[in-house]
């Protein structure tokens, strides 16, 4: 991210919620919190709520973080969870500013890039294939054909997006408190790849 910002200073650099959550989860592992995460539903929900902060409007993230810190102080796992709070503040409040956290990733495109770090020619080929798919769909739509049925993961992402929008509308209309909204977001944070749901 720093390299892009340095080479292209006018570019808005944002992160991806999936990778943000993945990074938080790796830190839970590295900080030795897996036993608490796996065995205590309240602690797991609280840790996921930190990941849910990225779903808030920018102007509410700091207040939400303060509220979660207070919830940690009243938790029976206070000592263990405060280590995660310190990590989160250092990494996601101080180092990477909240403005970088929220971005969606184009899953279809990135699934075409088989290697994590493709060379330039592989990347160009993927761009050509993506352009072909988009052009084909535009022609189909122009001829009156409906677009292809969204994949199961796309439909699931759309459901989650609607849930987030509904929660944010309730928050905005003062029908739901900030802390209740954040704790609801924790239910939308999935398990890391390779782990089953609890």
Image: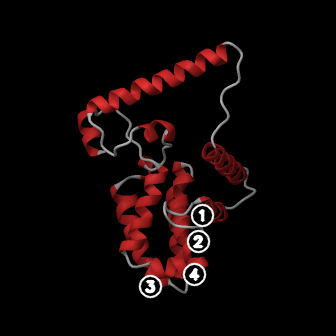
Q: Position of residue 8 (x, y in %)?
A: 28, 32
Q: Position of residue 54 (x, y in %)?
A: 51, 54
Residue 193 vs residue 41, the one in the foreground = 193
Q: Residue at x 39, y 68 (%)?
A: 27
- Give the crowd class for mark 1: few <14, some 14-19, many >=20 residues within 10 Å: many
Quadrant containing the C terminus in the rendered view: bottom right
Quadrant containing the N terminus in the rendered view: top left
Q: Quadrant of residue 127?
A: top left
> In 3D space, how far apart are the residues under numbered discs 4 and 2 (Cα atoms)?
9 Å
State the residue position of label 2.
45
State the residue position of label 1.
186
Q: Position of residue 41 (x, y in %)?
A: 60, 77
> In 3D space, how far apart are the residues under numbered discs 4 and 1 (Cα atoms)?
14 Å
171 relative to 48, above or below: above
- Point out the frontmost of discs 4 and 3: 4
Q: Position of residue 135 (x, y in %)?
A: 53, 18
User: Which one is earlier in the sequence, the residue at label 4 or at label 3?
Assistant: 4
- In the structure shown, which secondary structural element does the residue marked by tag 4 occupy? loop
């Amino acid at each position: 991210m720093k390299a892009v910002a340095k080479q292209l200073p006018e570019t808005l650099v944002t992160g991806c919620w999936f990778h943000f959550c993945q990074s938080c989860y790796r830190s839970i592992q590295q900080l030795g919190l897996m036993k608490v995460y796996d065995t205590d539903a309240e602690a797991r929900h609280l840790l996921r709520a930190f990941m849910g902060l990225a779903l808030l409007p920018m102007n509410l993230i700091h207040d939400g973080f303060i509220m979660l810190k207070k919830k940690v102080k009243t938790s029976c796992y206070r000592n263990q969870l405060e280590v995660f709070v310190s990590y989160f503040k250092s990494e996601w409040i101080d180092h990477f500013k909240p403005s970088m956290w929220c971005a969606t990733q184009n899953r279809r495109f990135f699934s075409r890039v088989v290697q994590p770090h493709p060379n330039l020619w592989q990347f160009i080929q993927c761009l050509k294939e993506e352009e072909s798919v988009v052009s084909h769909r535009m022609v189909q739509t122009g001829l009156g054909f409906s677009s292809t049925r969204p994949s199961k993961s796309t439909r699931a992402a759309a459901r989650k997006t609607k849930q987030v929008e509904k929660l944010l509308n309730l928050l905005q209309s003062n029908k739901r408190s900030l802390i209740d909204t954040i704790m609801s977001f924790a239910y939308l944070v999935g398990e890391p790849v390779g782990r089953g749901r609890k």
